Image (cartoon, grey):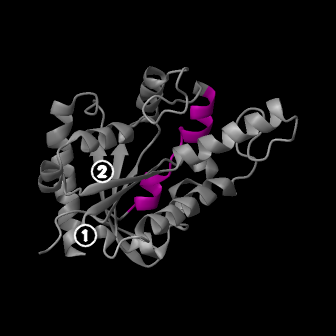
């Protein structure tokens, strides 16, 4: 029986664009409805935020408890090297391989949801896409959640909970960091001339943009039909590929 779900769905967009809320919505949707309406199977999530947050925590331990030099970031919380952003993409792909290894046919049931954000300041999507593995690119479709910088800033401020800075749904960036890292993004530049399939390392990856301004992701009743339409279009492209 043909599969009715994406093997890999990559969620992209600025911080606080709505990616985490989409993942939360899909996780809370029953498996039959999720597959039939949204083409998402049993969810296996890979997000680079917990990876980079671990680096910050380890640096804090080294500096404040062990009196040792920081390894990954400076005192302001910026990475020491730009290539660390690409290292995170390599880590995502490594995690994907690990998630598959104990299954005869991992994607018979699973949709891997991969989530990350990239700003032009640290290489953008142009750099990140060059570090996606062949195994990921062969099976991937991309949903880009589109909001302006001003909307990203508004929602980033709204969601930040200083008591839970490590939380997927409640983490945030100080305004000055958000501006430096994410005010400029290269999505439109990277996808210029490509409205359906994006060439990445010789692969044709289906792409669809979901506009989330005015905001849809704060109300599941509004999100459901918009997400259903976007993923139906993406599924049509994915199936043809």
Residue in view at x 35 percent, y 50 percent: 144
- Say whether marks 1 and 2 touch (CB < 8 Å): no
Q: Which mark is residue 54?
A: none
Looking at the image, residue 128 sits to the left or right of residue 220; the answer is right
Q: Eyeballing the image, is 80 above or below 240?
A: above
**Mark 1 and mark 2: span between their CA atoms?**
26 Å
Residue under label 2: 209
Q: Nearer the viewer, residue 39 or 205?
A: 39
Q: Nearer the viewer, residue 75 or 145?
A: 75
Q: Earlier in the sequence, mark 1 or mark 2?
A: 1
Instruction: State the quadrant of the N terminus.
Output: bottom left
Looking at the rendering, the stretch of residues picked out in magenta corresponds to 176-192
Where residue 22 appears, x then y in whole percent? 30, 41
Circle 2 crowding by C-alpha within 10 Å: few under 14, some 14–19, many from 20: some
Q: Which mark is residue 108?
A: 1
Residue 127 visible somewhere in the drawing:
no
Looking at the image, residue 5 sits to the left or right of residue 181; the answer is left
Res 226 → quadrant = top left
Residue in view at x 50 percent, y 21 percent: 161
Q: Could you tell me which secondary element the residue under label 1 belongs to?
A: helix
Residue 56 is covered by the magenta coloring: no
Which SS does the magenta portion mostly show? Answer: helix
Where residue 65 appears, x then y in whole percent? 81, 31
């Amino acid at each position: 029986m043909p599969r009715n779900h994406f093997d890999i769905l990559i969620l992209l967009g600025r911080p606080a664009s709505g990616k985490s809320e989409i993942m939360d919505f899909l996780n809370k949707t029953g498996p039959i409805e999720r597959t039939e309406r949204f083409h998402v199977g049993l969810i296996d999530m890979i997000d680079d935020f917990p990876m980079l947050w671990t680096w910050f925590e380890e640096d804090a331990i080294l500096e404040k408890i062990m009196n040792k030099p920081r390894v990954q970031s400076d005192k302001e919380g910026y990475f020491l090297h730009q290539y660390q952003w690409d290292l995170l993409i390599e880590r995502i792909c490594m995690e994907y391989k690990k998630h598959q290894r104990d299954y005869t046919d991992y994607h018979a049931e699973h949709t891997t949801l991969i989530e990350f954000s990239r700003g032009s300041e640290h290489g953008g999507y142009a750099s990140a896409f060059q570090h996606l593995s062949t195994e990921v690119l062969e099976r991937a479709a991309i949903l880009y959640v589109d909001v302006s910088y001003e909307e990203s800033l508004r929602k980033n401020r709204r969601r930040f909970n200083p008591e839970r800075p490590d939380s997927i749904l409640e983490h945030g960036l100080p305004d000055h960091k958000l501006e430096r890292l994410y005010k400029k993004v290269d999505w439109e530049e990277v996808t210029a001339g490509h409205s359906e399939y994006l060439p990445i390392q010789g692969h044709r990856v289906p792409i669809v943009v979901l506009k989330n301004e005015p905001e849809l992701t704060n109300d599941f009743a509004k999100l459901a039909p918009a997400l259903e339409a976007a993923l139906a279009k993406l599924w049509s492209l994915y199936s043809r590929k």
